[in-house]
């Protein structure tokens, strides 16, 4: 443990020795992934009763699709789906598998794709906002790199959020 | 519709002459297509389906122009109701607490076909649109840069499951030139259009030249309504009430309280003054789940009941939509929207760039935040070369603009325009997805950046598989599209 005075002194530096940038990058990535979630908590089994598994996977028994169960009356509908449709509905693939199987990564660089359409990183340095109250965050936590604005927010950070202890 | 018309555009007769030439060529093409298809015309329904990741906007061409059905593109489970609602059924949901969402879309792409099929089945059923798909045609939107393997699944669904007579699939922004956003009486549609489509999954910047998407200049910002709602959930849950499982409620809070700041510094200071009574803070009265009362913004002077739970919306009101303009605020290493637009324009022909700066419009639900348009203009002004005019054409209903443009396209010339580009059941039976690959080539990203004369050549070619075609396209791509090239003259 370092002494308080040194701690103060070191606070203003953007990156501190001992703070692995890889870990920070990983945490950021994890947080961004969390912001893409459709639900915060997965439902308990009780809640999905009659719905199959929430994530569309099977568990032992023969799987029923959602549309099989509800069976909407549609004029002119067919009785049986083709193999292509049954495959698409029954065997869900995750996004990275789908992208891999699309082979868009192998397209010549002259063809823009889902992968290359994303904007390049900005040229300006990131703006820091206090992770506790939202005001300018001119200091950074030496353990987890999250910005904060003053002593009181720092304390709240240390007690609740540091290294993502809460939430 | 247009509220701002650029001086630059008006003064540039050189460009208008270019437009006329191109339009002339296009018109001839349309006439030929009309002659070819006029004998095959039958009075079929065309269904217009803007298949968004958050909501589906759908209706029958000829009858539902102003009022498409708007249904959640989700299978929603309500704990309180102990019921599951599929798409259109959600309007029956009474208890909006802790809803569990199953969404067909993930990161802008359709990945859950089980959920999507159930929602489409319900949409086409007698409970909703009540259409016989086997006697109808379909115009459906697909994600920007939709994966080729996914496009095949779209094709399979439309012909093998729903058995449509014919269908056309394209990205939402490519339909905008057919709507009335950029049209003015007595003038041809704008030659250069730049659409910002900020939806649930992402924000795309999509330039269109002569009505076609310039795919090599399309840029994506990985910020959409889903991320913003989730970010707001986190802030509020940390600062006040735990709302992590309340996506539905927090989305309503976002839509009723949030705005885009035109002066972030000043607003941030204003919020510090007094947490309860500064000029920014608003109170959102959370829904009373025992009384079936929806949440709402507290009106000025409104007295609160004892049981009312209030959510204070202070700097959360503007720091959340701010992420569109400063993604770095949440650690996302992408430039803000204005910079993404500048990057997109830099991929366009030099002599036309001024036209794009002055013909921008905004579609998608995110653009509805108050202040969005003004902030974007301010940010763009600081990035645009001084000699260019920056203007944003006002879009009154950004959520349904793509739907209404699609509708206009489907009904134009008595449906002949649609008929010319749609793949028929017979064509699919004969050549499978190659049929749509060939026919949709003019609007698809895999043919990105090529002009119409080239894509016609592709259309006329006999069937071939994806690989040789791609090689061919990549050769043609490297050349830019001149607006006044001599090859375009009649
Ligand atoms: Zn603070
Ligand atoms: Zn920390």
Image (cartoon, coloured by chain):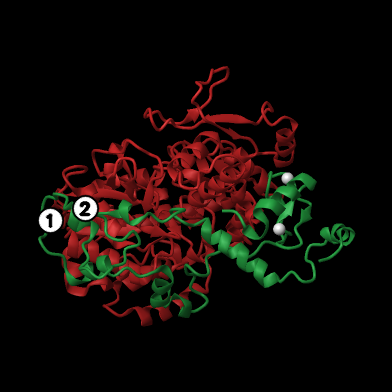
Is residue A72 depicted above or below A89 in this figure? above
Q: Dots 2 and 1: beta carbons under 8 Å?
A: yes
Chain B: what color? red
Chain in green, by letter, is A
Residue B388 rendering spot, x and y as whole percentages: 66, 49
Q: Which residue is mark 1?
A: A77
Neighbor class of circle 1 (other Cα within 10 Å; few <14, some 14-19, many 20+) is some
Q: CA distance from mark 2 to mark 1?
A: 9 Å
Mark 2 close to ligand 2, CB under 8 Å: no
Q: Is residue B436 left or right of residue B373?
A: left
Left or right: B80 with respect to B260? left
State the image coordinates of residue A150 (x, y, percent, origin top left).
Answer: 79, 46
The residue at the point 81 percent across, 66 percent down is A1
Decide which of B380, B130 is in the foreground and name it: B130
Q: Residue A134: where, in percent of width, then height?
A: 68, 45
* Residue at position x 26%, y 43% in the image: B89
Asked which quadrant contains residue B287, the reply is top left
Question: Dividing the image into 4 quarters, which one contains the C terminus of chain B?
Answer: bottom left
Which residue in the structure is indicated by mark 2? B121
Q: Secondary structure at mark 2?
A: helix
Q: Secondary structure at mark 1?
A: loop
Q: Chain of mark 2?
A: B
Q: Is ligand 2 less than 8 Å from the beta carbon at label 1?
A: no
Task: Classify 10 Å Cα crowding around label 2: few (below 14), some (14-19), many (20 and above).
Answer: many
Instruction: Evaluate whether label 2 is on the same chain as label 1.
Output: no
The chain holding disc 1 is A
Residue B435 position (above or below residue A70): below
Q: Residue furthest front?
A: A1
- Measuring from the top left, give residue B81's x and y in whole percent: 30, 40
Res A28 seen here: yes
Find residue B157 and report its image quarter. Answer: bottom left
């Amino acid at each position: 443990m370092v002494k308080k005075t040194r701690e103060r002194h070191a606070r203003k530096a953007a990156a501190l020795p001992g703070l692995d940038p890889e870990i920070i990058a990983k945490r950021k990535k994890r947080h961004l992934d969390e912001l893409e979630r459709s639900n915060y908590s997965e439902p308990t089994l009780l809640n999905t009763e009659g719905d199959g598994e929430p994530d569309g996977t099977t568990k032992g028994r023969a799987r029923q699709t959602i549309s099989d169960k509800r069976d909407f009356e549609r004029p002119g509908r067919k009785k049986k789906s083709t193999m292509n449709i049954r495959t698409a509905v029954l065997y869900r693939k995750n996004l990275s598998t789908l992208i891999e199987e699309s082979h868009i990564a192998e397209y010549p660089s002259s063809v823009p794709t889902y992968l290359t359409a994303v904007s390049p990183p900005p040229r300006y340095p990131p703006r820091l906002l206090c992770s506790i109250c939202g005001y300018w965050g001119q200091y950074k936590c030496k353990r987890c790199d999250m910005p904060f604005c003053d002593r009181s927010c720092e304390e709240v950070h240390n007690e609740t959020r540091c290294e993502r202890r809460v939430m | 519709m247009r509220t701002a018309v650029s001086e630059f555009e008006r003064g540039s007769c050189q460009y208008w002459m270019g437009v006329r030439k191109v339009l002339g060529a296009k018109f001839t093409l349309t006439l030929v297509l009309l002659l070819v298809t006029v004998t095959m015309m039958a009075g079929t329904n065309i269904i217009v389906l803007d298949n968004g990741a958050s909501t589906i906007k759908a209706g029958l061409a000829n009858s539902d122009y102003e009022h498409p059905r708007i249904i959640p593109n989700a299978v929603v489970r309500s704990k309180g109701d102990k019921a599951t609602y599929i798409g259109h059924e959600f309007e029956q949901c009474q208890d909006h607490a802790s809803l569990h969402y199953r969404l067909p879309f993930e990161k802008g792409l359709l990945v859950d076909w089980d959920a999507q099929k159930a929602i489409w089945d319900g949409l086409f059923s007698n409970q909703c649109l009540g259409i016989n798909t086997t006697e109808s045609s379909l115009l459906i939107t697909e994600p920007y840069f939709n994966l080729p393997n996914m496009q095949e699944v779209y094709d399979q669904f439309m012909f093998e499951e729903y058995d449509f007579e014919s269908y056309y699939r394209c990205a939402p922004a490519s339909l905008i030139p057919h709507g009335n956003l950029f049209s003015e009486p007595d003038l041809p549609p704008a030659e250069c259009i730049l659409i910002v489509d900020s939806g649930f999954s992402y924000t795309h910047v999509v330039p269109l030249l002569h009505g076609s998407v310039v795919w090599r200049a399309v840029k994506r910002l990985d910020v959409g309504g889903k991320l913003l709602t989730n970010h707001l959930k986190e802030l509020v849950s940390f600062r006040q009430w735990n709302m992590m499982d309340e996506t539905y409620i927090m989305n309503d809070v976002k839509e009723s309280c949030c705005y885009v700041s035109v002066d972030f510094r000043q607003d941030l200071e204003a919020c510090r003054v007094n947490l309860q009574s500064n000029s920014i803070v608003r109170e959102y009265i959370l829904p009373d789940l025992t009384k079936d009362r929806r949440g709402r913004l507290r009106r000025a002077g409104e007295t609160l009941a004892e049981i009312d739970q209030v959510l204070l919306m202070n700097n959360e009101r503007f720091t959340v939509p701010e992420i569109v303009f400063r993604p770095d605020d949440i650690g996302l290493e992408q430039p803000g929207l204005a910079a993404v637009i500048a990057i997109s324009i830099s991929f366009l022909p030099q002599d036309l760039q001024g036209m794009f700066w002055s013909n921008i419009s905004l579609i998608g639900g995110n653009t509805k935040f108050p202040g969005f348009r003004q902030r974007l203009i301010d940010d763009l002004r600081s990035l645009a070369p001084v000699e260019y005019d920056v203007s944003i054409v006002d879009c009154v209903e950004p959520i349904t603009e793509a739907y209404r443009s699609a509708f206009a396209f489907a009904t134009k010339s008595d449906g002949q325009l649609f008929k010319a580009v749609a793949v028929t059941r017979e064509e699919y039976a004969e050549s499978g997805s190659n049929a749509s690959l060939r026919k949709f080539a003019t609007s698809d990203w895999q043919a990105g950046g090529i002009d119409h004369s080239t894509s016609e050549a592709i259309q006329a070619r006999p069937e071939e598989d994806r690989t040789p075609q791609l090689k061919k396209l990549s050769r043609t791509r490297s050349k830019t599209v001149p607006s006044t090239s001599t090859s375009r003259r009649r």
